[in-house]
Image (cartoon, grey):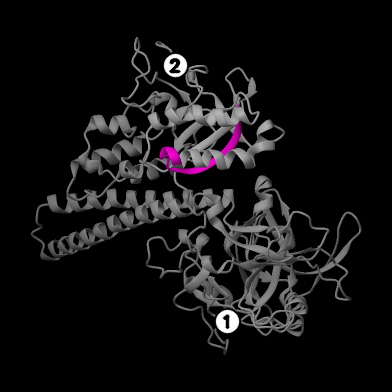
Amino acid sequence: MSVDEYAKKVVELSDEALLQAGFLGDGTSLCATQSVIEAVKTAKAHPKLLSKLTLFMLECKSLALQEGGIRSPPSPALPQPPVAPGTSPAIVVPALVSQFEAKHYWNGISEDPPELLYRSDLDSNPFPHPKPGDRWFQLPVKTAYGVSGTELNKVWHEVAPLIVALFKKRGISYSVLKSARFSTAYEDGKKTMGPVVVWVALHPGRNTAYNARDVSPDVLRILAEHGVKDAVVEWYEGAVEKLLGPPLLRVTNDTNPSYYVRRALTATLGMPIAAREMEDVNVQGSVSFFFHENRDKNGNPSNRVFGVSNKHVLTKATSVDYEFKGVGSPRERIRVCGHRRYKRFLVETRAVVARNVDECLRLAEEVVRLEAKPRSADEDEAADDASALKKKKAQLDEVVDTCVALQAFFTNTDADFHEIARRDIGWVDWAPKIATNVDFYGYTLDIGTFELDPRKFGTNFKGNVVDLGSKFDLHELNEMFWPNDSNPTGLKFPSDRQLRIRGVVSRELLAKPDCYDKNGNATYVVAKDGNTTDLTVGRYAGLEAYLCDELGRESIEVAVYNYSETSGSFSAKGDSGSLIFTGDGRMLAVLHSGMPRGLSNHVTFGTPAWWVVDQLKLRYKHADFNREAF
């Protein structure tokens, strides 16, 4: 469904249109759940109160009831013939390719492949169409490959300029000239590799399929004159766009409708990250903290800014040192939100919309009930009803506006960040091999740095700030961190929920904490904000833990236990790299491991932050961890 279709108002659509869209019916549509059907009926019954309810909001309500949402199969089956029985595929005048072929010819090469404009083997290599009476028709699935070991490889640098010159002479406004080969998988499981394709993209609207048809023989002639036989020329419309993603989102006030869900894409600590080289295994982690280099290794001024995380989050090879070699060298890209975390962001946003839609429906029914209620002879009851009606109307207006704002946020943000290449935020700079024998302390060295792309952070960068989110209210957090009423510090979390991180808990204070529990015992209540479990609260174990793995390798770690029986696990898989911090904003440790059992984890381990900072300063001697702007 397109953005425009999603924006359609429910009250403005007929029942037939809602049925066609899948939001009414007998339950055969995934979207037409009973609760969605009831929502449609409520909106239709009270069109003035629910005039802003859209199809997008209904779909969010439906998807919130399903695990994982609706996913299209990789090879879509067509439940109904795309043309009426007894007719042939329609040719749209003056197009040379049927609508069906244009839409499905490159099925499989992307989620939304381009439409075919023309191809030179249109007559000799017909594309399969559903036949009259076919109820289930399986589309072939294509995969695009590079061209290698062919005659075209030998002469491409000669023929490509000739083809470009031909295009210029004939007025062909091309945007891309490239080559490819396509493998095709069929319903019976067979796969074939197609011929060499000269793949041409035209600037939209500047040429026609007839122009492509007329110039294709001359392209093939150039190829044949240079020994390239049996090639095909395929055409489509498309303009090249820079794949630089948008800047990360700014941190908002907690009154913003998108406050909770947008945190995954804001420039704060705990930002979920994934290395491009490990996308296939879905390895994800979190940003520990940021720092400015100030001066490079030669003492020259530097404006580079770095993020810190675990070595095993940033690179696949954990037993070898990595160092970026500089301009011109391949870059190991780091991205905000891997596939799994981004999908979770979408699901969470839809769920927030769904909850607000339910609240809209409830409040609308309350307004109708109170308006229909006869005025009571009891003045107190009448005044109470009038006050309730006024408040519920105001609440309904606010929740409706929230739904509208969330729809705009979802649409715009997904358009900006959906393509994973647009989520690049930097590249690995330094990631030494994981080791436990760096010095006599025996701590685990599992850290690395990545340079931040200034175009992605800019003015939205606030330095080392943890967004506390909305999982806990501030009163609850204050009670968990400072339970002792006699605590003389007067500390409390900031009202804007933005906790600035400054300084580290020293080795001496790890041994003798300067905070106390409700019984007066010296300890630290700590927190972390991670990729998987978001903000969690735990208890510092007080004494270092000594670990030995299955190969006999020993290490010493900071240990953190879960806060309580009901608090949930302090960490889970995917939280690696998260910063463990105290309530007053000091870095205590960098999380790297735990001891999961089933779906829970009873203890979390990390490397002391003071030691991590010392290791970073050996590499970046002038590092500044406290700056608040890029």
Q: Can residue 68 be seen in this view?
A: no
Label 2 residue SS: loop
Residue drawn 33% across and 15% down?
84
Instruction: Please tell me how crowded label 1 is: few (under 14), some (14-19), or many (20+) other residues with Cα within 10 Å.
Output: few
Of helix, strand and loop, which one carries label 1? Answer: loop
Query: Which label sits on residue 83?
Result: none
Q: Does the rendering let one see residue 386?
A: yes
Q: Give the residues drawn in magenta, as a range.
A: 169-183
Quarter residue 148 falls in: top right
Which residue matches tag 2? 130
Viewer-nearest of labels 1 and 2? 2
Examine the rendered structure and indicate whether residue 117 appears above or below residue 90.
Answer: below
Residue at mark 1 to residue at mark 2: CA–CA distance: 63 Å
Using residue 167 as the reference point, say whether residue 186 is left or right of it. right
Whether residue 476 is situated above or below residue 257 in the rendered picture: below
In x, y percent, where is residue 280?
Answer: 67, 45
Residue 408 position in % (x across, y down): 35, 54
Q: Does the magenta segment cover residue 12? A: no
Of the image marks 1 and 2, the number of the one nearer the N terminus: 2
Q: Within the image, what quadrant is residue 152 found in?
A: top right
On the rendered image, what quadrant is the N terminus found in?
top left
375 vs 574, left or right, is left
Q: Which amino acid does label 1 sit on?
A: Arg
Please state which amino acid type lies under the numbered disc 2. Pro
Provide the residue designation for mark 1: 627
How would you classify the magenta stretch by its main secondary structure?
A: strand
Q: Nearer the viewer, residue 575 or 251?
A: 251
Seen as rendered, the residue at the extreme right is 552
* Membership of 175 in magenta stretch: yes
The percent position of residue 212, horizontal first and vertical second, equals 43, 31
